[in-house]
């Protein structure tokens, strides 16, 4: 492992690109290898056994590139299978999005009422409430699964009226429960952030853990002397398990880049 080794990042689909964007902004010289498991998205509606199997296989794909660090850009895997990822790459650090989101929310809340939205698997695991209450046991955590947000994001329905309709349905109860902070506990949700923010109104702070993860990554690499200090700004190497062209178009839409090359890998 050396400073030029890549950073591996994975998610079930395009959601993890919200993390890629933040890591690129904080660490422009780092080579990123991103894997989106587009053949098997969504993860959040699957059982823990299946999610753990996928987590192990996704990690194995990234390990072929000998990364110096892995970011689990998927809350569902962070909630249910972070130990699987850690075990599959015992010699390098692993950063999960969930802990970073919980820490940020605890710093931000003023009235100790935090809302969390995520996939069914993440919400059922209660992992956010555990992580938040581990930091501050006085805080009340109110959760809501929003499973339809994932396919809406995968379809690029950023501002679509149907997204607003679903957001009204999912968020009405949370809005009435007096939360002052809402964690986007799924990396697909920042893609729909505008609609979510509009639905919640101006008094609820929205937490997206991507930036906190990027800063944690920078600190970890810096502490271990593994920061890439070159002046190059390499484009991420993109891997998917299905439909590379669709991914390429969505990547262009969300990242505002040229149409990138996307490699198809077998899972
Ligand atoms: N983006 C992922 C997450 O943060 C997974 C969404 C899904 O595949 O259901 O949970």
Image (cartoon, rainbow, N blue to C red):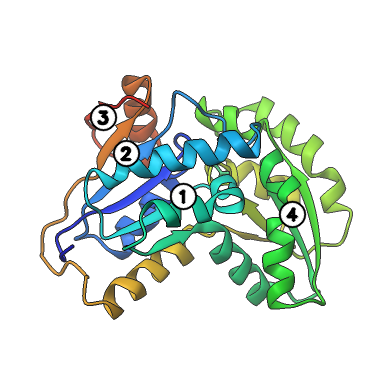
- Secondary structure category for the residue under label 1: loop
Residue on which disc 4 sits: 126
3 or 2: tag closer to the N-terminus? 2
Badges 2 and 4: C-beta atoms under 8 Å apart? no
- Which label number is shown at residue 61? 2
Q: Which of marks 3 and 2 is in front?
A: 2
Residue on which disc 1 sits: 73
As measured in the structure, the alpha-carbon distance from the residue carrying label 2 to the one carrying label 4 is 28 Å
- Identified at 57% across, 49% down, the residue is 75
As measured in the structure, the alpha-carbon distance from the residue carrying label 4 to the one carrying label 3 is 35 Å
Please rate how many residues cluster around mark 4, counting C-alpha atoms within 10 Å: few if below 14, some from 14 to 19, many from 20: some
- Secondary structure category for the residue under label 4: loop
Badges 4 and 3: C-beta atoms under 8 Å apart? no
As measured in the structure, the alpha-carbon distance from the residue carrying label 3 to the one carrying label 2 is 15 Å
Please rate how many residues cluster around mark 2, counting C-alpha atoms within 10 Å: few if below 14, some from 14 to 19, many from 20: some
- Identified at 40% across, 44% down, the residue is 10
Q: In which quarter of the image is residue 261?
A: top left
Asked whether mark 1 and ligand 1 are closer than 8 Å, the reply comes as: yes
2 or 4: tag closer to the N-terminus? 2
As measured in the structure, the alpha-carbon distance from the residue carrying label 3 to the one carrying label 1 is 18 Å
- Which label number is shown at residue 262? 3
């Amino acid at each position: 492992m050396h400073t030029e080794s890549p950073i591996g990042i994975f998610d079930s689909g395009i959601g993890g690109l919200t993390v890629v964007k933040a890591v690129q902004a904080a660490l422009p010289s780092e080579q990123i290898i991103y894997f989106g498991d587009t053949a098997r998205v969504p993860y959040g509606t699957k059982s823990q056994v299946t999610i753990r199997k996928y987590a192990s296989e996704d990690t194995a794909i990234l390990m072929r590139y000998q990364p110096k660090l892995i970011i689990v850009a998927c809350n569902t895997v962070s909630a249910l299978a972070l130990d699987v990822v850690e075990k599959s790459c015992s010699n390098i650090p692993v950063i999960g999005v969930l802990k970073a989101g919980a820490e940020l929310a605890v710093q931000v809340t003023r009235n100790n009422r935090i809302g969390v939205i995520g996939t069914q698997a993440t919400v059922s695991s209660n992992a956010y409430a555990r992580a938040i209450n581990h930091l501050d046991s006085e805080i009340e955590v109110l959760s809501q699964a929003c499973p339809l947000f994932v396919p809406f994001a995968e379809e690029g329905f950023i501002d679509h009226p149907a997204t607003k309709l679903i957001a009204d349905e999912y968020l009405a109860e949370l809005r009435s429960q007096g939360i002052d902070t809402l964690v986007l506990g799924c990396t697909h949700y920042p893609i729909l952030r505008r609609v979510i923010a509009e639905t919640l109104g101006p008094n609820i702070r929205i937490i997206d853990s991507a930036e906190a993860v990027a800063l944690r990554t920078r600190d970890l690499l810096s502490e271990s002397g593994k920061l890439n200090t070159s002046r190059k700004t390499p484009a991420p190497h993109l891997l998917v398990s299905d439909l590379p062209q669709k991914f390429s178009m969505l990547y262009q839409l969300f990242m505002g880049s040229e149409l990138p090359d996307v490699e198809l890998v077998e899972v």
